[in-house]
């Protein structure tokens, strides 16, 4: 296992779209191990997406404190309600913006064995699922943040 370098403030790269994983096996497993180790090395981090470590593949890991969730080719299949809260990102240190998210989401994903798995949840877990899956589409939270009081709408 190895810690991966997290790209910071590289909005051009983070606006690129990631491709689906098609090859399952040792290389993917090692990458997921690295992603989890890198996520856990950062205090208060709840999620990390592959593009953040320079890899344009549809992979992300989340840990909101209930254990690691590994996402491979994830798709949101249902979303309900709304939550509005401050959000941050390891790729944009010390920036926190208000982002509106669904309060509940259900996600279809694959696991390391290329089997279909589903994850669902609300609150912070739903927010993390949306944030990380956005990364795979080349969307960062700054793109969809609410315009704040006193901030120019440019
Ligand atoms: Co992020």
Image (cartoon, rainbow, N blue to C red):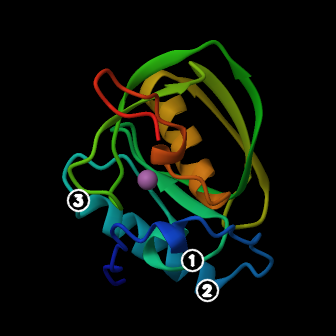
Check if mark 1's residue and mark 3's residue have beta carbons within 8 Å: no
Q: Which residue, given by chain and number where applicable, does mark 2 sit on?
A: 26
- Does the beta carbon of the residue at mark 3 sit less than 8 Å from ligand 1? no
- Residue in view at x 36 percent, y 51 percent: 89
Residue 29 is marked as 1
* Mark 3, other Cα within 10 Å: few <14 / some 14–19 / many ≥20: few
Q: Nearer the viewer, mark 2 or mark 3?
A: 3
Element on which disc 2 rests: helix
Q: Of residues 151 and 31, which is closer to you in this image?
A: 151
Q: Which residue, given by chain and number where applicable, does mark 3 sit on?
A: 42
Q: Position of residue 144 (x, y in %)?
A: 54, 38
Q: Is residue 103 left or right of residue 96?
A: right
Q: Of residues 143 and 102, which is closer to you in this image?
A: 143
Check if mark 1's residue and mark 2's residue have beta carbons within 8 Å: yes
Q: Position of residue 13 (x, y in %)?
A: 53, 74
Q: Of residues 67 and 130, which is closer to you in this image?
A: 130
Q: Position of residue 82 (x, y in %)?
A: 58, 15
Element on which disc 1 rests: helix
The answer to which of marks 2 and 3 sits earlier in the sequence is 2
Say if 56 sits above or below 107 in the image.
below
Check if mark 2's residue and mark 3's residue have beta carbons within 8 Å: no
- Residue in view at x 23 percent, y 64 percent: 41
């Amino acid at each position: 296992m190895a810690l991966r370098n997290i790209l910071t403030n590289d909005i051009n790269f983070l606006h690129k779209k990631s491709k689906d994983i098609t090859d399952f096996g040792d290389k993917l497993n090692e990458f997921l191990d690295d992603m989890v180790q890198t996520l856990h090395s950062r205090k208060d981090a709840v999620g990390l997406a592959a593009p953040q470590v320079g890899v344009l593949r549809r992979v992300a890991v989340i840990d909101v404190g209930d254990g690691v969730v590994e996402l491979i080719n994830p798709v949101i299949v249902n979303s309900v309600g709304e939550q509005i809260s401050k959000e941050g990102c390891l790729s944009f240190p010390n920036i926190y913006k208000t982002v509106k998210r669904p309060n509940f989401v259900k996600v279809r994903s694959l696991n390391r064995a290329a089997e279909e798995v589903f994850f669902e949840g609300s609150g912070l877990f739903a927010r993390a699922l949306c944030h990380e899956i956005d990364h795979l589409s080349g969307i960062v939270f700054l793109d969809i943040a609410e315009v704040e009081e006193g901030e120019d709408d440019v």
